[in-house]
């Protein structure tokens, strides 16, 4: 069965510093991997995805993520954090075509301090 | 472009009452999903529909039923509400189940069962 782990419930970072939100997964086959963001009292919004190709994926709002097959990780990164990046971030793997829906991690709350 | 619309946004029920959460999407997506979000639990899949007229159970289907009679609508029913069903419910859609396409989420429906 596929599973996903976000080992940190909370990540605190100073504005202007780089940020990393970690995600590891357990999925057989070739995974599709997604990151979503949720702002307070809102639905989830798509940030970026890895399907195939370059292991470094760039997405919305300056975020990027690196797919590491050997470590089964898909960490979300941003070179310089903004206070407005403070939100709840979810990692979600999928098995790919013809398989089950996305399974979401429990989320990591990012707090960027001015 | 409205995207995914959920109604109602807020609802308070007494134990044992029934209700239906409605979800409509205007993107001609084939697949639709119902998730619930609880603190510390992330998003958990209740039911999904890969295409019009088909539905499948997700991780936490007990106490719920669904209906996908029209491609653009996906209804989530609670026949006899319980306090454990107090949660925020999110509807989402994507082009195809298991595809590389991202999920589009509604703004959520906050349900309280007393």
Image: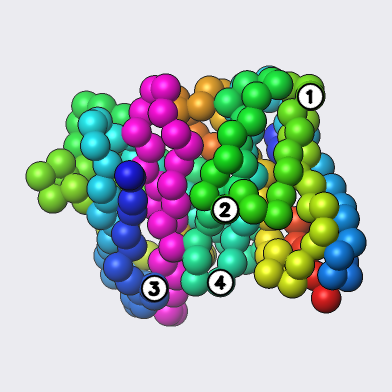
| N-terminal-most mark, 1 or 2 | 2
Instruction: Assess whether mark 3 and mark 4 are in contact (beta carbons under 8 angstroms).
Output: no
Q: Where, by quadrant of the figure, is residue B5 drawn? A: top right
Label 4 in the same subunit as label 3: no
Find out whether residue A92 is within the magenta segment: yes
Instruction: Assess whether mark 4 and mark 2 are in contact (beta carbons under 8 angstroms).
Output: no
Element carrying mark 1: loop
Furthest toward the left, the residue is: A70
Q: Position of residue B47 (x, y in %)?
A: 62, 42
The N terminus of chain B, quarter of image: top right
Q: Nearer the viewer, mark 1 or mark 2?
A: 2
**Disc on res. B69:** 1
Label 3 in the same subunit as label 2: no
Element carrying mark 2: loop
The chain ID associated with circle 3 is A
Label 3 in the same subunit as label 1: no
What residue is shown at x 57% (from left), y 53% (from top)? Answer: B60
Q: Position of residue B94 (x, y in %)?
A: 57, 30
Find out whether residue B37 is within the magenta segment: no
Q: State the residue position of label 4.
A: B39
Which residues are the magenta region? A90-114
Crowd tier of the residue under label 4, counting other residues whose Cα lies within 10 Å: few below 14, some 14–19, many 20 or above: few
Q: Nearer the viewer, mark 2 or mark 4?
A: 2
| N-terminal-most mark, 4 or 1 | 4
- CA gap, disc 4 to disc 3? 11 Å
Lateral position of residue A67 relative to residue A84, left or right: left
- CA gap, disc 1 to disc 2? 22 Å
Q: State the residue position of label 3.
A: A9
């Amino acid at each position: 069965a596929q599973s996903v782990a976000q080992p940190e419930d909370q990540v605190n970072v100073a504005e202007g510093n780089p940020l990393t939100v970690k995600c590891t997964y357990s999925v057989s086959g070739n995974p599709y991997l997604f990151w979503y963001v949720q702002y307070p009292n809102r639905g989830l919004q798509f940030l970026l995805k890895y399907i195939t190709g370059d292991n470094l994926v760039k997405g919305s709002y300056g975020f990027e993520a690196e797919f590491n097959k050997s470590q089964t990780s898909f960490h979300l990164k941003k070179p310089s954090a903004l206070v407005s990046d403070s939100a709840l971030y979810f990692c979600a793997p999928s098995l790919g075509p013809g398989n089950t829906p996305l399974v979401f991690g429990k989320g990591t709350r990012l707090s960027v301090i001015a | 472009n409205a995207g995914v619309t959920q109604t109602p946004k807020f609802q308070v029920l007494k134990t044992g009452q029934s209700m239906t959460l409605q979800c409509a999407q205007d993107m001609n997506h084939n697949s639709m999903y119902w998730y619930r979000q609880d603190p510390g639990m992330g998003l958990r899949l209740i039911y999904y529909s890969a295409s019009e007229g088909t539905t499948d159970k997700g991780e936490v289907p007990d106490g719920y039923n669904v209906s996908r009679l029209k491609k653009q609508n996906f209804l989530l029913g609670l026949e006899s509400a319980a306090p454990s069903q107090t949660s925020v419910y999110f509807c989402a859609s994507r082009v195809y189940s298991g595809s590389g396409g991202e999920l589009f989420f509604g703004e959520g429906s906050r349900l309280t069962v007393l």
